[in-house]
Amino acid sequence: MQLYTLERETEGFLRDRGSKFLAFAGPARTSAEVEARVQALKKSYHDARHHCYAWRLGDKGEQSFATDDGEPAHTAGTPILASLRSHELTWSYVVVVRYFGGTKLGVRGLIEAYRTAADEAIAANVRLPIIPRVPVTLFYPYERTADVNRVLHRMDVEIVQAEYTDTCRQTLAIREEEVAEFCILLDQTLIAWKLAD
């Protein structure tokens, strides 16, 4: 299944029986990045009663988290996470800030409101396809840098980490479908490599 991430942070809004739901959806690479965004929103909307959110991380959406922040169990975070899943998103988060309007919405009403607010913020965004990548580490003497660069320029490669001394070490992220071809090119160039842990 093709998964996506979000291009930037966008907002959504829902009013239901006096309660206001402000939703924020955006991309994230780590849970710490999401937590920092949540804290910033808590500061900006300090007078709101709830700051509920969910996130999914990993190329296959294998990591996820949701919190109800004081709402009844599974009435806020779970529907927000369901919205992320239904839009096939990963490396993404949604935060929904609720201002209570004086009328209780009930379990079904809360679930619907949080999911709809999340959907609104996501709908205002652009989905970008996730391209699964595999980490590969290269080891080579500095004088072979030109040879390595010739191989790298032939492929769609992201440099994740690099150390350049008298011997060089690079950890790269290679498109999953290009790993075999990349490793053959490295072997032909006599460059040492291993699949990174």
Image: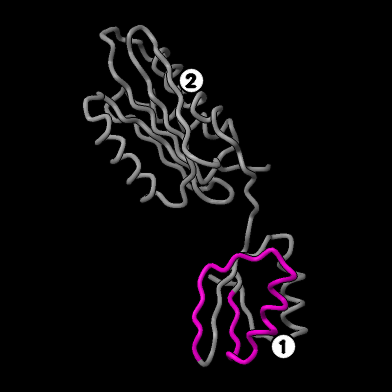
Q: Position of residue 54 (x, y in %)?
A: 42, 36
Residue neighbourhood size for the residue with mark 1, other residues' Cα within 10 Å, grouped as few (<14), some (14–19), many (≥20):
few
Residue drawn at (27%, 27%) of the image? 70
Give the label on residue 70, or none: none
**Pointer 2 with pointer 1, Cβ within 8 A:** no
Mark with earlier residue (2, 1): 2
Quarter-of-image position of residue 142: bottom right
Q: Where is residue 165 in the image (x, y as percent from the top left)?
A: 49, 88
- Image quadrant where one finds the N terminus: top right
Out of 74 and 178, give the one closest to the viewer. Answer: 178
Of 164 and 91, which appears nearest the observer? 164
Task: Kindly state the secondary structure of the residue where label 1 is placed.
Answer: loop
The image position of residue 177, as x and y in percent, is 73, 60
Q: Position of residue 47 (x, y in %)?
A: 21, 25
Dot 2 amino acid type: Thr
Q: What label does residue 190 carry, if any?
A: 1
Q: Is mark 2 on a helix, strand or loop?
A: helix
Q: Relative to 180, is 171 on the left or the right?
A: left
Disc 2 target residue? 116
Relative placement, left or right, of 113 versus 91 is left
Taking the spot 46% from the left edge, 43% from the top edge, the residue there is 64
Magenta range is: 137-165
